[in-house]
Image (cartoon, grey):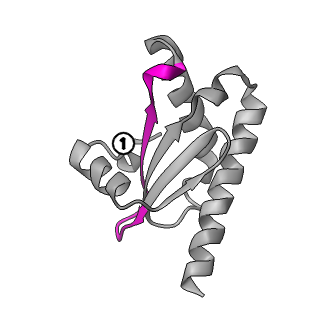
Amino acid sequence: MKKKYRLKKSHEIATVVMNKQRVAGKHYTIYYSKRDDGIKIAISAGKKLGNAVERNYAKRVVREILRPHLDKLPSYSLVIVVKELSKNISFYEKKESLEKTLKLLLRKENQKND
């Protein structure tokens, strides 16, 4: 994922999480808030997920799943939290689960705007 899509500053991430707008799936939770200047994403994998190697792998998988969707997503700040359940499933199942959670987010926002 390119640098222009990264949400890096801890106060920005905290603001998104404190906003308390979220969508939760079985394997991922997505906190979000509107922004004006394009999409920014932060990925979080807690220590329950495993050691540093496993957490970094989980984040790389999420980045790879998101890569083709970045241009299609509206302007949001997203904080994606990887849940412990995602540890024991295949890449295809992870992709399916994250895409389903993103669709929930888009559907929720479309209903809010109507």
In the rendering, at what x and y percent does residue 39 appear?
Answer: 43, 58
Residue at horizontal 44 percent and vertical 27 percent from the top:
46
Q: Quadrant of residue 37?
A: bottom left
Q: Which residue carries the number 1 mark?
A: 3
Residue 79: within the magenta?
A: no
Q: Secondary structure at mark 1?
A: helix
Residue at horizontal 49 percent and vertical 44 percent from the top:
80
In the rendering, at what x and y percent does residue 51 appear?
Answer: 47, 11
Residue at horizontal 51 percent and vertical 67 percent from the top:
74
**Quarter of the rendering occupied by the C terminus:** bottom right
Q: Quadrant of residue 28?
A: top right
Please state if 39 lies on the left or on the right of 106 as rendered: left
In the rendering, at what x and y percent does residue 1 appear?
Answer: 47, 39
Q: Nearer the viewer, residue 53 or 23?
A: 23
Q: Nearer the viewer, residue 42 or 39?
A: 42
Q: For the magenta stretch, what is the residue range? A: 33-49
Q: Nearer the viewer, residue 62 or 107?
A: 107
Q: Nearer the viewer, residue 1 or 106?
A: 106
